[in-house]
């Protein structure tokens, strides 16, 4: 009872402060900045409410007539079955919410039909995938929950972990030190546990957990034999809990000549082991240097170098992929990620 009373007092105080605040031009400008770029990734309010508040999966907010108190109440308590409750210490502060409200209110009301959802239900969607998308999850997490499945694979996440992420997202142990979270907390009234269990089945059974592999290649450094590139690959999972990738293949496409079979870039030497030679890459239809790793466990990191000579050796490695045979995706395919490369290559 005391906690409930305290929470109500905090909300009432925030509402009084919001009502007392008259938005200024500076507030509107700051609200626009928050709306357009508060989060470094794309997962934010715009994904449901539209780039300029014109609506989409969720209602239009451009030109709204809510008072600051009303707007803040919706943000803090959640709305309907698809919008979670956002909290001031992990999401936007009260002042930031009021500034966003002022910016959206300053926009003209949209005309015409609302835009399509960011993530629509695929024609061949299973019932569980349809439930996942229409519940709102797919608007931020895309059609197949790709990134959260990597997170779960790295932590050894089970249904209890998943349930905590949905109902207690801002207070879960994994987010204890986080300052700016993109997701709030859903209530069991919004998402009943029976619904959540079906979404979990889509997440973990139909799709499957993924190994959180990351890889990047450096810019080239001149060396005695040509230009040397450093490749780093890491399983960022938690040791003792995360998944292990097995039969890992790293593919680095090389510059080719007019003849598809002509290798104009030569591999002079490599370090780190696992180099298997030059093979044909079906994705880029070019010759590619390949490395193989038997396994990469959670927390494990490996570094390789490759020295190139010949035409284009100093032009950089513009792309690359890492794939692993196990664990296989539950859809039957192998998992694959793109290798990060320096900007401008």
Image (spheres, rainbow, N blue to C red):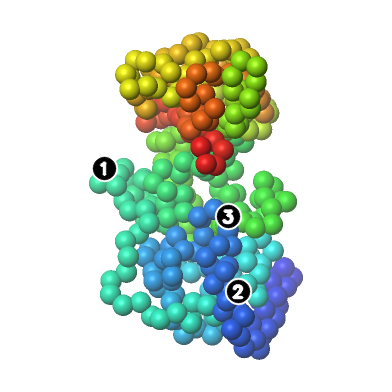
* Image location (x, y in percent) of residue 52: 44, 70
**Separation of marks 2 and 3 at Cα, in angstroms:** 16 Å
Q: How far across and down, in percent of the image, does residue 253 sit?
A: 45, 24
Q: Secondary structure at mark 3?
A: loop
Asked which secondary structure carries label 1, the reply is loop
Give the residue pinned by disc 1: 124
Q: Residue at x 70, y 78 (%)?
A: 9
Gap in angstroms between the C-alphas marked 1 and 2: 42 Å
Question: Which residue sits furthest left?
Answer: 123
Q: Residues within 10 Å of mark 2 (few under 14, many from 20)?
A: some
Location of mark 3 (residue): 40
Q: Residues within 10 Å of mark 1 (few under 14, many from 20)?
A: few
Apparent side of residue 298 relative to residue 186 in the rendered image (left or right):
right
Describe residue 310's horizontal placement relative to residue 304 as left or right. left
Q: Earlier in the sequence, mark 3 or mark 1?
A: 3
In the image, which is nearer the foreground, mark 1 or mark 2? 2
Vertical placement of residue 140 versus 19, above or below: above
Quadrant hosting residue 240: top right
Name the side, left or right, on which 175 lies relative to 81.
Answer: right
Q: Which comes sooner in the sequence, label 2 or label 3?
A: 2
Secondary structure found at label 2:
helix
Disc 3 from disc 1: Cα separation: 32 Å
Q: Are marks 2 and 3 in contact (CB under 8 Å)?
A: no
Q: Which mark is residue 30?
A: 2
The residue that appears at 63% across and 62% down in the rendered structure is 91
Q: Which mark is first along the chain, 2 or 1?
A: 2
Q: Which sits in the foreground, 240 or 338?
A: 338
Residue 85 vs 64, above or below: the answer is above
Q: Residue at x 66, y 33 (%)?
A: 238
């Amino acid at each position: 009872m005391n906690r409930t009373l305290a929470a109500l007092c905090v909300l009432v105080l925030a509402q009084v402060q919001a009502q007392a605040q008259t938005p200024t031009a500076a507030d509107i400008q700051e609200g626009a900045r928050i709306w357009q770029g508060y989060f470094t990734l794309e997962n934010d309010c715009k994904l449901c409410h539209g780039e300029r508040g014109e609506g989409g999966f969720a209602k239009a907010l451009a030109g709204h007539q809510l008072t600051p108190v009303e707007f803040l109440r919706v943000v803090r308590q959640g709305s309907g079955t698809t919008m979670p409750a956002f909290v001031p210490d992990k999401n936007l502060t009260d002042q930031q919410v009021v500034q966003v409200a002022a910016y959206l209110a300053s926009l003209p009301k949209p005309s015409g039909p609302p835009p399509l959802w960011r993530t629509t239900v695929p024609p061949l969607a299973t019932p569980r995938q349809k439930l996942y998308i229409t519940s709102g999850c797919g608007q931020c997490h895309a059609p197949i929950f790709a990134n959260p499945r990597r997170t779960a694979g790295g932590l050894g996440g089970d249904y209890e972990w998943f349930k905590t992420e949905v109902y207690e997202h801002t207070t879960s142990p994994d987010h204890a030190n986080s300052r700016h979270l993109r997701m709030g907390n859903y209530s069991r009234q919004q998402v009943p546990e029976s619904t959540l269990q079906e979404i979990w089945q889509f997440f973990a059974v139909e799709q499957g957990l993924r190994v959180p592999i990351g890889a990047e290649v450096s810019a080239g450094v001149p060396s005695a034999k040509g230009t040397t590139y450093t490749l780093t690959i890491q399983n960022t999972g938690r040791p003792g809990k995360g998944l292990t990738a097995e039969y890992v293949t790293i593919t680095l496409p090389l510059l080719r000549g007019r003849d598809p079979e002509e290798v104009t870039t030569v591999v002079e030497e490599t370090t780190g082991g696992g180099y298997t030679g030059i093979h044909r890459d079906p994705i880029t239809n070019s010759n590619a240097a390949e490395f193989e790793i038997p396994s990469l466990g959670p927390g494990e990191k490996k570094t390789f170098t490759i020295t190139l000579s010949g035409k284009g050796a100093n032009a950089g490695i513009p792309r690359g992929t890492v794939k692993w045979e196990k664990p296989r995706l539950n859809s039957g395919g192998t998992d694959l990620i793109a290798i990060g490369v320096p900007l401008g290559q």
